[in-house]
Image (cartoon, grey):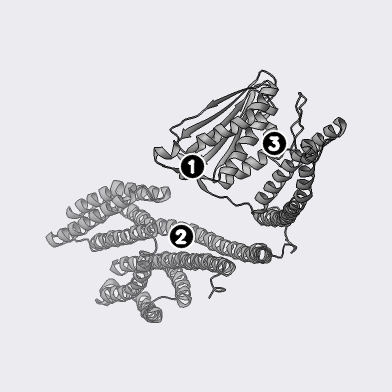
Amino acid sequence: MKRLFSISVLLQTATIVMTLAIAAVCGVYALSALRNQEQARRVPQVLELSNNLYAALGAIRAERGRAFRLVASSRFATRADNAELDRMRAASDKILTATLAELAVLAFDQRDKSVTEIRDARIGFEALRQQLDATLKMPLEDRPADLTERWAATYNRLADAIDQVSNRLENELTVTDAVVAGLVRIKQVAWSLRTEIGRDRVRVATAIAKGQSPDGDFRLELATIAGRIDGQWKILKDRVALSDIPPQLKESVAKAEKLYFGETRAAHDAALADLADGRTTSPQIKKWLQLVNPALDSVFAIGQVALDSAGVYARAQFSIAQRDFYAAILLMSCFCIIGVLTSVYVVFGVVRPMTRVTEAMRLITDGNLTSHIPYKNRGDEIRSLAHGLRVFRDNALEKQRLRIEKDGAVAASRAKSEFLANVSHELRTPLNAIIGFSEVMKTELFGPVSERYGGYSTDIYNSGTHLLGLINEILDLSKAEAGQLELREEVVDIAATVEACVNLIREPARKAGVHLSVYLDYDVPFLLADERRMRQILINLLSNAVKFTPEDGEVTVATVRVPDGLAIEVRDTGIGIAPEDIPKALTPFGQVDSKISRKYEGTGLGLPLVKHLAELHGGSLSIASEVNVGTTVTVLLPGLRIVRVAQPLRA
């Protein structure tokens, strides 16, 4: 479980998951772009097929209209009429054949059924063409009366089959893109408009050919057709007025409006007026006949321009979709490569170095301080981590070295202290004998001695006494450092102890020409302390103060109650100590140079011993000094050593 949730495993897993997620997102984007590309690829194909279907409808409708006029005409078909009819048939056959071939390869709903219907209707349409050619060679009265109806029904069957396929394809286009849907709708309106105009032309042309005057029903039918034409034209105009309509489509609509609604409609109304007056060959009728076909072609051209514009737009969208698809593939490839490179870098550039550094850290933590720390030459955060570990290792090595040295120094100091304690103890026995015998000789206890030997015995006594004091100090300091010095605690009258110590120092002070002052607070409570050690503290401090104070100087001892306990201060106006030399003065055998010759050089044990004795009582020692101004030594004893004793005890 610990291995499963390690940082290296989580980091690798997170990197792989992120890489797969990015690749999946890019893959989804690529699939979406591919679908858009395929859809965009299909739209131009459908538009081209729809355009061909539209052209086929226009061609067979033109053939139908021309055949209607020839069948309804009283004259025989001329060579020119037949040539024009053959040209129309060739055009419609060509485009219809091409359209059927395109329909056979384009997949859409009910394709086979639609192709079969168009082919069957075309076969019937071509069969009726032969009857139509034979009829045009007959006089008007011999022509079959139902030919026009059969011709219209056959045409309608073929046109409906084509129109159904066209509507099915165009309905598919209306859900792909709003721009394409709008242009296809314009084409549909244009085709419906062209159909109504063609229907109006057939009605009027038939009336002119028969030379009949328009009656009420005829006029009502033409008015209905005109209303549908105007309504569809308004719809077309409103759609073309939108901002996203191509300029060429707007130009096509403007051209159709000028040809039909500006010229053909006026000629149409004038032709109907002449026809009502019985004039079938008036100039207005000829003008209308000359204008109606170009007007029909201009309306038909609106649909073609709309489909062409939709095709241009669809091809542009296909290019964009293709570009997006390739961009998605490129993006997916780039992210996959980046993900793989990132995973490789994470594994070999981050996880493995972190693992090695972590292993080195574990070894160092376990105490193997000589283990190798890798990656010291890298230039990234791993190098900083390795450097930090190296610093930690070096510090640990240094601490280990210092600890070994400290342990050695402590052991040496303890051995020295024990040695000094043992040696000092062994030295006091013969030294006491020397002092005792020299005192016997000095006092002439067993008889007189010469004056010279008397002086020698005095010198021996004084030297032995001084040496005994030095040995005692060494013994006490050694015991203190070795932790063997114990206190004999009792209730001590600190004021009486201070006065007794001052009295012992008063004679040496007088000889040195030093004024000695005492300031005691007699309301200071009694102390729970070792009286002998307190005397030792006071005598050492007072002796040092007198020793380092020049003639006519002053030494003052005072006891002061402070919030933390009781302070014993010894001040002098002596030579002073530089601040940087104070730590040296507190070390055993430490000597601070002075400019004044002293009668006793001293050993440097007084202040260290006082410090140990103060700390043994739970207190502290502090020194404030200034060169050539004086020194103040303060011994602070804790408040827990202050006791309350009844007044008669002090008395």
Residue nearest the observer in this picture, 197 or 323:
323
- For the point 54% across and 46% down, which residue is it? 618
Q: Earlier in the sequence, mark 2 or mark 3?
A: 2
- Label count reads 3
Of labels 3 and 1, the one closer to you: 1
Type of amino acid under label 3: Ala
Residue nearest the observer in this picture, 308 or 215:
308
Q: Earlier in the sequence, mark 3 or mark 1?
A: 1
Type of amino acid under label 2: Ala
Q: Position of residue 549 (x, y in %)?
A: 68, 24
**Tag on residue 314?**
2
Q: Determine if residue 492 is in view.
A: yes
Q: Which residue is mark 3?
A: 585
Q: Which residue is mark 1?
A: 527
Q: Determine if residue 143 is in view.
A: no
CA distance for labels 2 and 3: 101 Å
Q: Secondary structure at mark 1?
A: strand
Quarter-of-image position of residue 393: bottom right
